[in-house]
Image (cartoon, rainbow, N blue to C red):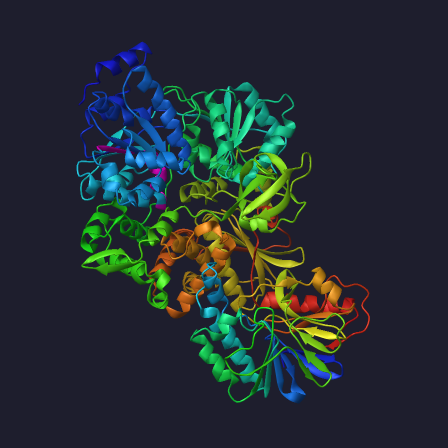
Amino acid sequence: MNAVSLTLSGIRLEAQASGALWWADRRLLAVSDLHLGRSGRQARLGGALLPPYDSAETLDRLAAAIDALRPAVVVCTGDSFDDDAAAGADDPALDGLVRLIAGRQWIWIAGNHDPAPVTIGGEWRRELRLGPLTFRHRADPAAKGEVSGHLHPKVTIAGRSHRCFLADGRRIVLPAFGAYTGGLACRDGAIASLMDPGAVAILTGRRALAVPLPGQSSPRAATAST
Amino acid sequence: MSALPPVFRDWFAARGWQVHPHQQAMLDRAGEPALLLVAPTGGGKTLAGFLPSLAELASGTHCGLHTLYVSPLKALAADIRRNLARPVAEMGLSVRIEDRTGDTSPALRRRQRADPPHVLLTTPESLALMLSYAEAPRIFAGLRRVIVDEIHALAESRRGDQLMLLLARLQRLCPGLRRVGLSATVEDPAAIARFLAPHPAPCAILAADPGPDPDIAMLHTDAPPPWAGGGGRHAIPAILDQVRRHRVTLIFHNTRAQAELFFRDLWLANAEGLPIAIHHGSLAREQRQRVEAAMAEGRLRAVVCTGSLDLGIDWGDVDLVVQVGAPKNVKRLVQRIGRANHRYNAPSKALLVPANRWEIVECQAALQAVRDHDLDGEPRGPGPRDVLCQHILIAAAAGPFDADALFAEVTGAGPYAGLARGDFDACLEFCATGGYALRAYDRWQRIVRRDGLWQLRDPRTARTIRMNLGTITAAETVKVRLRGRAGAPLGEIEEDFAATLSPGDTFLIGGEVVRYESLREMTVEVSRAAGRDPKIAVFSGTKFATSTRLADRILAMLDQDDWPDLPDHSRRWLELQRAVSRLPRPDRLLIESFRAEGREHVCVYGFAGRNAQQTLGLLLTRRMEEAGLHPLGFVATDHATLVWGLDPVLDPAPLVARRALREGLDRWLEGNAVMKRTFRNVAIIAGLVERNAAGARKTGRQATFSTDILYDTLRRHDPGHVLLQITREEAMRGLVDFGRIEAMLDRTGERIDFLRLGQVSPLAAPLMLEHGRVPVEGAGRERLVAETAERLMRAAGLA
């Protein structure tokens, strides 16, 4: 299987090459930072005019991840919509989202771009506790057993920048799943100060691959096994 | 109107000047509807163009605009204004001459619209703007003549295509309009005449005496040039010596970055402080104007410059032209050489400075071509349709139009004489809906048909259209300014380069080292950082490919038994290649394969020019990927393509088979970056995306981003979209240049010289040092990433 296994607070998880996190025991799939409707928002702000196909592409990839694993629960850890208006927008691509939501538990976690409840279906939460794990948008530096998003982490290996998961003994940060989102280099201070020494980055794309988190020194406990 | 009015005769006589025969001929034939004058640089071409206008205006009876002069350069318009002012004043003619370019103040532009001068000097872009206003018929009423200067340069670009569309429009507004084209020496004057002619009328050609042959040589330097790269900095002592020995020297470079680096090092070596300036298109207008003024006043001994000075600015005292770097194109070289010595009967003096080993060979071939009067040129196809789309929008901005009338007008322009009605209608449809995939978005529905006439759907669109006029799509740039409340503007740098800078980084602009402080509202703020080593400025001018004719000469030269004309180090280099491997031959394709630096390499000596070699690199790596050879990247120069990867190439014949390359091209063309870059330019010109969004809130990076997505979108949902068709046509003849790969295959047939070597060959070695390496995304790269990841995990004790 094209994924890297991780253990967080005793729970076995898989970082998928698609950028989704899979909790097999609960058949739970977590994705972050879909940024649906980004092009529409930029058009509303008078900025770059993107055609509205970004949402369609993001949803195509999400549908592929869902088809592959058939989750009972999908958790979107925030910034699922680029702004509150996007969640109500009549973008035909969002019809596809409704089809994905149907027949499973779907939980939207509030992000900084979409702080208000959505009207599109599914449940809305500020954060979600499940067993020893907490899902929230923005990482809390003091938390343990936390799955978050927000940072859009990226790591450069062999001259290439890849979206990646970040993982240490206390937390997992998910990569951005949305089609046209930017990224934050792992060397950035915001990431370096959040993650423990010995943290790993897991590359996404065609293959999931674990690498040491760049800029971290003195590796200690190994948290990942490939 | 053949006789020169007495006041002119007296003026010439008072200076002891004679009217050149071609100047007289221009007066004699002033009534021709279209006339092309071909004369060498310095042949009094501009005056020849203006004499008939001045003679007609001398009577003082003409009201309003009489002559429109269009040049490709703003600087040229300003220069001509200065040069005409003197004779006009001295002859006491009451002729008003003004220029109007992007540099003209808004107040003056408004006045010119209300009260045009007798002679208006402008650029194609400013003319497009003037014709986009509803009052255009009033501005141009009474116009008799239009003079297109440097038409040989315009005829090679979309700017010329646009200009010819604009002239067709003017011709309809002023049916008696006479056209004059002024051209430097070119290989095919008839093609330029067809370009200029108001189709189907013919255009007569008038050829001036070409003058004496230039005095041209290669500059020999104590230090041999480096193996790779450009810049010619090794030649600075020798060039300074030449500057000392001449009155005024122009030092041409092929790119702006090279000009900057050279200029800085020239100043470090300029112990006696000779007044030397720099001039290129990225510098702020104020900077350029200062240099131009100083040059006009004779205060400079040398100017380091780029193509921005290629065209006919008359700086009479120039007595030496130095070309640093291979000229790439003999015609352009001859035109540059003509900048030296504007005395009609004296030979121009020029020196070539090859910047690396390959360029020594190329410079030698170029010298021979100049001596043989063997000019090169690649014929251009019909006028591109993205320019036509823009023209339709310009027409709509000026007022409602009838499609049949506009089609008739457009086909009166030389480059569009063969335009099919169906293609015209497709462009019209694009302007009306944006095309099938975009028809749902009203922002692309610019024009509608009401009562049989096409017009702007929303009149406010006119402003957007005007702000996006023109066909120049240089790389996106940001302004550079000194920090402080009223910091002096220094120039512009490419946005991609600006994005690589962090506070504290230093780079060169206008010959000074500056430190990056911040990026604010599309302006880079810098402070002076004297004496620091700069990070290199990568903003570049256009990269030209070595012409076919010149490449053929290089191949013929390499085929010689010995090279008595080349310096010793170059002869030894070629002899070593002959001993270690083989020399490329005109009728065979040399391919070398070897292992170096821990990677397998294969080098294909196609001599097809930079763009085609680049395409060859993309196609080869694709074929290698399919063959499981794990290519990792390639680099292309004008002469060869070097590919590196994880596995050796042992049988290159299937890789370079014509059918394989053609098939590869078809599949590859769709998704690649060259196409996206070409599409971006096409999309901007055709008005699909804006280059200047109102209030400049969109950065070029965002524009690039969105045109990439538009490209992918159209490719997926509307593969027949007219802009995709244009992109393909453009890429084939421009950046992709597949025609030259075909020509290479015609030349070499199936005859391949393949050598598996135990080492890097002498000819391939410089390629290993070239910039501009292109990575290949594929299985090889994935394997490398996986291996790297594993190594890192192991090293960190995590795996």
Near-viewer residue (B770 or B111): B111
Point 53% across, 64% down: residue: B624
Q: Residue furthest front?
A: A116
The quadrant of the rendering that contains the C terminus of chain B is: bottom right
- In this rendering, the answer to whether B10 lies above or below B96 is above
The quadrant of the rendering that contains the N terminus of chain B is: top left
Which quadrant of the structure image shows residue A4?
A: bottom right
Near-viewer residue (B142 or B591): B142
- In this rendering, the answer to whether B158 lies above or below B689 is above
Residue B546: where, in percent of width, then height?
A: 45, 43
Residue B152 magenta? yes
**Residue B557 visible to the viewer:** yes
B75 relative position to B230: left or right: left
Residue B79: where, in percent of width, then height?
A: 40, 27
**Residue B672 visible to the viewer:** no
Which quadrant of the structure image shows residue B2?
A: top left
- Marks counted in the figure total 0
Point 36% across, 31% down: residue: B99
Which quadrant of the structure image shows residue B574?
A: top right
Near-viewer residue (A184 or B712): A184
- In this rendering, the answer to whether B397 lies above or below B86 is below
Near-viewer residue (B61 or B335): B61
Residue B731 magenta? no
Residue B298: where, in percent of width, then height?
A: 49, 20
- In this rendering, the answer to whether B625 lies above or below A122 is above
Residue A57: where, in percent of width, then height?
A: 49, 72
Q: The magenta stretch spans which residues?
A: B144-158
